[in-house]
Structures are given as structure tokens and as C-alpha cells.
Amino acid sequence: MEELLEELLEECRHYTREGKLADYIPELTKGNLDDLGVYVVTSDGKRYRAGDYKKQFTIQSIVKPILLLQALMDNGIDYVRSRVGVEATGKPFDAINMTDQSLLSENINPMVNMGAIAMCSLIKGDTYEQRVQRVLELTRVLAGNPEIDIDHDVYLSEKRTGNKNRALGYLLKSYGMIQDEDVEGLVDCYFQACSIKVTSKDLANIGYVLASRGRLPGNEDRVFPSKYATYVNAILTTCGMYDGSGDFAVKVGLPAKSGVGGGIMAVAPTRMGIGIFSPGLDEKGNSVAGIKVLEKLSKRMYLSIF
Amino acid sequence: MEELLEELLEECRHYTREGKLADYIPELTKGNLDDLGVYVVTSDGKRYRAGDYKKQFTIQSIVKPILLLQALMDNGIDYVRSRVGVEATGKPFDAINMTDQSLLSENINPMVNMGAIAMCSLIKGDTYEQRVQRVLELTRVLAGNPEIDIDHDVYLSEKRTGNKNRALGYLLKSYGMIQDEDVEGLVDCYFQACSIKVTSKDLANIGYVLASRGRLPGNEDRVFPSKYATYVNAILTTCGMYDGSGDFAVKVGLPAKSGVGGGIMAVAPTRMGIGIFSPGLDEKGNSVAGIKVLEKLSKRMYLSIF
Amino acid sequence: MEELLEELLEECRHYTREGKLADYIPELTKGNLDDLGVYVVTSDGKRYRAGDYKKQFTIQSIVKPILLLQALMDNGIDYVRSRVGVEATGKPFDAINMTDQSLLSENINPMVNMGAIAMCSLIKGDTYEQRVQRVLELTRVLAGNPEIDIDHDVYLSEKRTGNKNRALGYLLKSYGMIQDEDVEGLVDCYFQACSIKVTSKDLANIGYVLASRGRLPGNEDRVFPSKYATYVNAILTTCGMYDGSGDFAVKVGLPAKSGVGGGIMAVAPTRMGIGIFSPGLDEKGNSVAGIKVLEKLSKRMYLSIF
Amino acid sequence: MEELLEELLEECRHYTREGKLADYIPELTKGNLDDLGVYVVTSDGKRYRAGDYKKQFTIQSIVKPILLLQALMDNGIDYVRSRVGVEATGKPFDAINMTDQSLLSENINPMVNMGAIAMCSLIKGDTYEQRVQRVLELTRVLAGNPEIDIDHDVYLSEKRTGNKNRALGYLLKSYGMIQDEDVEGLVDCYFQACSIKVTSKDLANIGYVLASRGRLPGNEDRVFPSKYATYVNAILTTCGMYDGSGDFAVKVGLPAKSGVGGGIMAVAPTRMGIGIFSPGLDEKGNSVAGIKVLEKLSKRMYLSIF
């Protein structure tokens, strides 16, 4: 298996240069396009890795399923579902014309920024700092890595340039979709969560817990109920790869989430968790080489759930 | 298992009256809201049924995966994929302002009307009548039922009132997405395909072929290559239940396609094909009781692919 | 005044090559980019002209105010207004998702194609041919030119390639906004109306009738009531120059209508009618040099109504 | 003339109860639906009034042309035009999907909130407080009323509930359309400007200055160049009455601006300025009775510019 991974990396290495580093946060432009790593944790407890699997990068949007899990653990499916929808399509809304437009909870979902900020609003905590700590702690538990922490420079970079997210926060507030008085504090919570530093190995571990429906590797106890895993995996399948989710379903066929830091976490239900890192992104914000590795891995090991 | 099906029908019977009969085609308003039937074909060759599983109804949108299969069999994945996208979200387009708008193949998919009409354009045949016959023949083969035929009254009803579909056909033509000279003929082909009469049993058989990746029940030969089944199942999961696909993924977790005739065809990959009939529809055009039956069946038998 | 016109043409001649010939109808690509002509009819009965004012071209969208006038003369303001709106903004509609979308008469207007086709539907006549003849006759009367006729080649070119307009016709039909059984016949009526051949002089005469609120030059009798002129002029101001209407209002400040044939008809209420021809179009479909001539003419003669 | 105004108020009084008080700012719900006043200033220096012309209300969106004037006086037409468009249609933008959406200056205009906030960004001043004072001072000069001031309660109410405007401010910032570091300060500037208290008389005076292209009543000196008035009047005509501008053009035919406080300022170029107050609003946010009074006044006095 480790040979297969090495082989796949070789086959896909030339794709690393077809993507571009994310540039919407200044700090992310400092990445190295040549990085390419993969890590796999299987249901029989085996671990396989190849390439730059130890390289750290920020989790970015891959924190969205973790925020969703924390919101589910704090509120249950029914309440979370009543506040934020699950459909793939975010309907356009015209922020300019108040009489003409509405924003419905049905039209956002936890895998888009607006829904993720709404998730931060549902996570319990006396202060925003406490909410951040709880998300960080859950990430550490899922990844089995107590060293995981926030990249302060990336966080400051996000905070400095994250006006679109501020706008989304104020839109949520103006349409009564969040109760928070301190929108800046709420959005800051999201900036910090996106700045959590992880490795391919961490992502594979987190993916494993979703694949095993709540169980940590080598442990029969569940961190969260099985139904939360099913809920998250379903949403990852329909919306996890931005507006490339349909294409990813056809080509790879696994629940997965990408982040503009270059990571992809993939879930092969009951079989394995997969973490990949390669920072060159396509136009939709997904790792080019990462998707190629997953496509080949899925084909060779018949991983597609379809 | 048959007891389970009976039980589920009883539990879900009261939902049949929560939906409404489709009214956009006059002929469909003649249905009976009380009808409720289910049929299951499993991978070990067993067949289970309950309720009105023999009742005939028109296939409507459930013909879309069949049109897609025929287009794939005639052209291969690469060509079909190059002509019609696979993402869940159809981007709005403003048909009024020509300089401001474009229509991209990426923004339609085979499970929405425009994409399905484009599929009809890709199906081979010297005449439109021949294309219809080929689709009808494929339906018969997949369902293992040579008696399947077109409901002429429903077809005429569709033809009389199908101006929205005509508009879609002319839009495809105006944006160069189809080559057909005779748009009326092409759309007529789609009207006929939607008017094919089936039963829950037929749908279960068709679903079984998709579940077994191309094999007919009791037969090792494939009607089509395995990869076409994966392609279709993936698209069914992300877009098969209209804009209720995300909710269906979360609650049921199976590739499925609904039609406004009241049918649902569901696919449990490697495990079973399921056909359901109950003509009361929710606002999105999906069978209310049908979804409920599937939700309970999926939970009791752990069918979710997530 | 004629000197002024000559001067303006000289100043603006270099703009003729900044535009492009319309290419969406094959026949229109045969125009000559160097053509530039202007014609003015004033309220004191004077006539001024310069450049290629005798050159013929097809009226295209400038027939829209004539269709609107005929519809008003046949039905009155209240009925026409109840069928088609007057706001500048056509709301986007998603032709794919039937349950999600609607098309409201308020959201189209007579200066966009869909509204113009709806106007054809309101014009009286036993046959579509008769409707076309009535529009042609009104054009002749307004222009004071009984020789005006249809350019058969352009008409056939429009008919061959006008699938977007067919789509619009079928959308109108599918949303119950027109009663016509024969959508192809209705759209054909629009194709013929767009193919009427005119000169700058004809457009100036037509503009004069709108400027004098219904009176022909040298005649106190009105072809139509004053209030119809006000209605048309108001709509020309807010929507006459496609999505360049706001810019035109700021720069020129006159009710006007452009056509992709290269013509512009402008109305200086109570003062003059202006016809311009220069077939090089900007991205919005408006004559580049034509707008420049009007901008300068408006400034020098203080024509802006604002 | 004053008799005519009294007569019009009587004829239109019953319309006051057809509208509703604005409720999106708590403070505005305290208005009195029965209020109805009108004030006219003519080019020959006469002044006519009827009804509650002394009643004070907040200027709300009617401050937008004043913000535009101040921005023009500070930067000139070319710069203002390069930053914010003039077309009537605000294109929808999807604030959720960053890779899919853009926000172009061409697609906003000074009469919608986003454009008005952009105007605040163009107004000069060392502090936001100074900008507010300059706008207040310009309002006093145009209205010839040094007593005009800000309604502190309404301002605080706007500030408390104005999250949609905050969202618009952060969107402008995120798309690089404003340079301001302090978006909250900028939006606060807009909240204060909207809270300026005026009367129908004040509005009539302001309208007069626009009608006389920059001149104060009884004064030949211009407060601003004639071309700024033309620019503002053109935009008022195409976009001044929200998405009721087309209807207003057809029925009244004057440049005008409404506010949700119940005021309308109308401009009859070269002839008169008109101020109206009646707080019952239609669904588009325009004063119901106010529009009716203007419609009748325009008809009786042939004021339409078309």
C-alpha cells in the first residue's frame, strides 16, 4: 500500500505546478508549490504515508465539518438543521435591494462561509475565546494530536483582509439568522478556526473518525453519535468541494472537504480516512494534485461509494 | 423483509395525503392520492413487495438517468461530460439581456430538464422516432419487462402544455449547445420518454441494474460498463431529488431519482434496487410518502452510503 | 445648424471604427463601418442633414417603440400596462428549475425582446401577416415615407438564427403571458418588424412625432393621443438604450432608442426629432459614433431634458 | 395655485391610509399616517403650500442626491463616475461563493444604499464627523434653512439596526471599492446623513436648486455647476424611486427621490421644486399619497419632461 502511495505521488507530481497558491490571504502566498503529501488510516488500524505528510499548513475550510460536528454535539441535528440548510445550491441574493430580496436558512449550508459562520454562532461558550478553544480541542481529539494549534500569522492575515466574511456575518445578523450581538467577535472566531495548523496525517485521522462513524482509531468509544457522521458525510458529498462537488463525486466518489491551504480530507466510510496536502489550487479553490491523487487512489482501490 | 415493507407502508400511509397531485400536466391530476406501493430487488436475487406495486404511472423525470445511460452508451463519458456538466447548481440566466448573459454547459446537468433535453440530442438514431424507440427498448431491458410502453394520453398532454420545455430546447439551440435542426422534434422525443408507463417493480429492477453496476438480475453480463453506473449514481446523489437532494442525502443517503408521476427509484449500491410509488408530491415535486418510506427503510436496514 | 451637423460628424468620424458590426445575425455583418449620417427635424418645420442620411439599414430594436405605440393604439394604456411592466430592470429567471422560478409581467418591459414579443401579441389583426402590415403601415405614416418596406434577406436571416427569441416566446406562453396558439407565427411577426428598412431621415421623422406628442410635421392632427407619446418617451428614457440607458441619460439626456442595425432615434420633446446611423456598435449594442454625435449635439444645443 | 394644492390634498387624502409606516427602523414606526403636506417653489420666486408642510421627518434616502452632489463638488464628475455607475439595475451578487462572483462599480449607483455609502467614502473630511458636518451644511444651504439638524433618536435607531448597511460597507471594502480603513465609521456617517430632519418646505427648496441647475432662490450665483444638476436629475429619473422609477416616469415624469421617512423631493427642471410628506409607504418604500399628489400635479400643470 505504501508503495502504491509513492507511485501515485510520482504519477501526480507534475500536477502540483498546474495549480496556483491561494492569494486572497497574503500569508498563504508563502506556501511551496512543490509540496505533496498523503496519509491514510485504515479500519484495520494500519497507517500508510508518502511524501510531505509531515508538512504543516492551515486547515482553512476543512475546519467546516469540525465546526458542524461541534454545533451538532452542542445542539443536536434537529436544531442545527432548522437553522442552516443542506442543499448544494446557494441561491444568489441581492444585498442592495431590501424590498426585493430575502435570505433563507434553507439556501445556505455549513460548507459555505456563511453557513460556517452560522455554525460558530451555534457553538456553545461563554466567550468567543472559549468557543475557539472548544473547536481547537475537538480538532486535537479527532486528529489524536494534542500539539495542534493556531497559526497566529495566518490568523492575523485573515483578520486583516476578511471583510467579505465580515459582510457575511452582518448579513446573517440583519436577516435574524444569528443572535450574536458582537458580529466582529463571531467572525473572529471563524478566522481563528480557519487558521488551525494541521498535517496530512492529522486530516487522515479526522477523516478516519468520520469513516468509522465517530470512533477514534483503536478505540470502540464514540466521540460523537454515528448519525452525526452520516450527516456530515452526506453534506461533504454534496457540497464539500465547493462548486466542484459534482465533478468530484463522479471522479472520486468519496465524502471530502478541501481548504485553500491546500489540504483535502477524504472519508471512505467504514474503510479509511485520507489526508492530502498540495497547495496548488484550481480555479474553484481545490488542490489540483490532491484531487488527482484521490482519483487514482479511488480507482485502484475501488473506494467510490457509488 | 416483506413484513418490514408492509409495516413501513402502514407507518407512512398517512403521509400520502400530505402531498398534492402534480397539476402542471392536466393528465397527471387524474391520479389517486391513496396509492402507495414499494418493491425491492436484492443482490441475492430476492424480491419483496407491498401495497400498490403493480399500479402503473408515468416515469416522468425518472427517465433522466435512462436518457443519460443511453447517451453514455452512445458517446462515452468524456464526450457526454464535455457537453453537459455535473454540478448540482444551475446558475440563473437572464434570458432577456443578451449582452449580459451566457449559458454554459457546466451549469446544467442531466437531472434537470435542460440537461435531459441535451441528452436526447446526444442519443443516436436516424429519426427522433428511432431515438424514442431506443430509449423505450433500454427501459424494457433494464426493467426486464418487454410490455413497457408509452402512455399516449399523457404524452399528448405533455406535448400540448410543454412550452417551458420548448423554451429550454430553443435556448440550448441558441447557445449552440445542441446541433439539432428540428427543436420541436427533439423536445417531442423528451415528451415521449417522460410518458413511459412503469410500475414500482419496474423501477426496482432498473435500480437494481444501477446497484449491481450494469448487471441484470440473475445475469453476470453487463448491459453497460460499471463506470457508467458509478457516473449515474454519483449524479443521482448530488442532483437526483431536485433541490431536495441535500436533504435526501442526509435523511436517506442513497442515489435516487424522483418523478412528478409519483415514482422514486432508489439505488443501494451492491445491495438492492428499490421502486416506490405514491403520487402525492411535496413543493419540490418529490413523493412525500415515498421519501418517508425510503427514510425508514434506510434507517432500519442501514442502507445509507455515508 | 447644418454646419453644426457637418462639424459634429467630422469630430465623431474616428469613433465609427471603435465599434463592431453586429454579428448575431449573419446578414448584418455586411454593413459598412464607415457609414455615418444624421438627420434633424425641428418643431418649426426645418430639416437638417449631414453625411450618409440616405443610407438604408434595418430598424431592428427601434421598432420596439412603434410596436408599443401600435399596442397602445389598439388597447389603451391601462391594458398594455397590465400586461407588461415599465421598470428598467429585468429580473433574472432560472429557466431550469420550475418550482423555484416565476416570470412576472412587472419584470419585463416593451424595450426588451420579451416585452416586444408580448407587444406583437397585443397588436390586433386576423392573421400575423395582417399585424405585420399594420406595423409597417404605422411606420410609413410616422416616417412620412410610403416606400418603407421589409428587407427580406435580413428577415430570413433573423428567422434562421432567432432561436433565443423563439425561447422567449415559448417562455411567455408557458407563463401564461400571451394567449397566442401559434408561438412561431408570433415570433415571426417580430422578426419581420425588426427587418423594416429605414434611413436616418425616417428615424428623425418618427422621433419628431414623439417629440410633438403625436403630430406629424406640418400637421396639427394627432396620429395618436399625447399621453401615448409621454408613455413611450418615459420608457425610452429609462430603458431605450439597453443597459446603457443610465449612462445615456447622464451624457445626452434625451428619450432615445437604438438598434443593432446601427440606428438611433432620439426625441427632444417639443423641440426636435433626430435620426442617426453608424453601424459600429459598442458591447451593449449601441452605435458608438451615434452616441457621440448625440452627446455633442445635446451639449451644444442644450437639449437635455434634465 | 395654493387652491390647486389644497384641492389635490383633499383628493389624495384617502390614499394616506393605503400605505404603511416604515418598520425597519423602530423609531420610524412612531410616525402619523394622517400627515400630508406639500410645498412648491417656482422659478419666478413664488411659494405655495398646503397641509402639514411644517411637519418634520427624517430625510432618509432623499439625502442620497445630496451625498452625490457633495461627492461631485469634492471630486468632479469623471472621478465619481469612475467609482460608481449610473445604470438602473443593480445586478444580483452572490455573497457566498467567492470564486463565482464579482461586484462591479458599474452595477451599483448612487441612489441605492451601496452606492450612497460609496459616496460617503468620496466626500472629503479629516474625520467622519467632519464629513457629516459638511453634508449637513450643504443640506442647510440647499434648503436655505440653517436650523436643519440630525434627529438623534432616529440616528441611534439606525445605528442599532443597520446591519444590512454594515454588510454593504464591508462588501464594498472587500471588493476594493472603498479605501476607508474604518468601515464602521463610514457606515455611521451614512446613518447620520439619513437622520437629518427636514420638512416639505426644505425638500421643495432643495428641489428648486436642482431645477434651477445650481442656483438658490432669488440668487444668480450657483452653489454648484449646472452639469452637476443635470447629472443628478438624470440619475433621479432612472433610479430615484427605487424599483418604482419606471412607473413614476410614466405617471409623473419628473426627476424625484423618495425616502422611507415619507418624503418625496421632485424636480421640474427650470420650473419648480416640490416637497411632499406623507409617511404611508407602498411595498417599494415610496409614499403612496405623495406619488398620487405628484401625479395629479404633473397632469394639471403639464410638468412631465417627456
Image (cartoon, coloured by chain):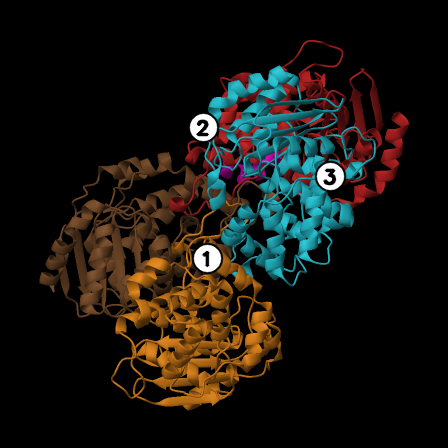
Chain colours: A red, B cyan, C orange, D brown
Q: Position of residue D186 (x, y in %)?
A: 43, 44
- In the picture, the quarter occupied by the C terminus of chain D is bottom left
For disc 3, the chain is B
Q: CA distance from mark 1 to mark 3?
A: 39 Å
Q: Does D283 sit left or right of A272 as displayed? A: left
The residues colored magenta run A156-168
Going by the numbered disc 2, the residue's amino acid type is Arg
Tag in front: 2 or 3: 3
Q: CA distance from mark 2 to mark 1?
A: 33 Å
Tag of residue C248: none
Residue bearing the label numbered 3:
B141
Residue bearing the label numbered 2:
B17
Q: Position of residue B111 (x, y in %)?
A: 62, 42
For disc 1, the chain is C
Tag in front: 2 or 1: 2
Q: Position of residue B257 (x, y in %)?
A: 62, 36
Residue in the picture at 54% in, 24% down: B292
Q: Does A54 sit left or right of B17 as displayed? A: right
Tell me whether marks 1 and 3 sit on the same chain: no
Q: Inspect this view and state whether residue A282 appears.
A: no
To which quarter of the image does residue C44 belong? bottom left
Tag of residue C172: 1
Going by the numbered disc 3, the residue's amino acid type is Val
Q: Inspect this view and state whether residue C41 appears.
A: yes
Disc 2 secondary structure class: helix
Question: Which of the two residues, D148 or D66, is positioned nearer the viewer here?
Answer: D66
Q: Residues within 10 Å of mark 3 (few under 14, many from 20)?
A: some
Q: Position of residue A252 (x, y in %)?
A: 75, 35
The overriding secondary structure of the stretch rendered in magenta is helix
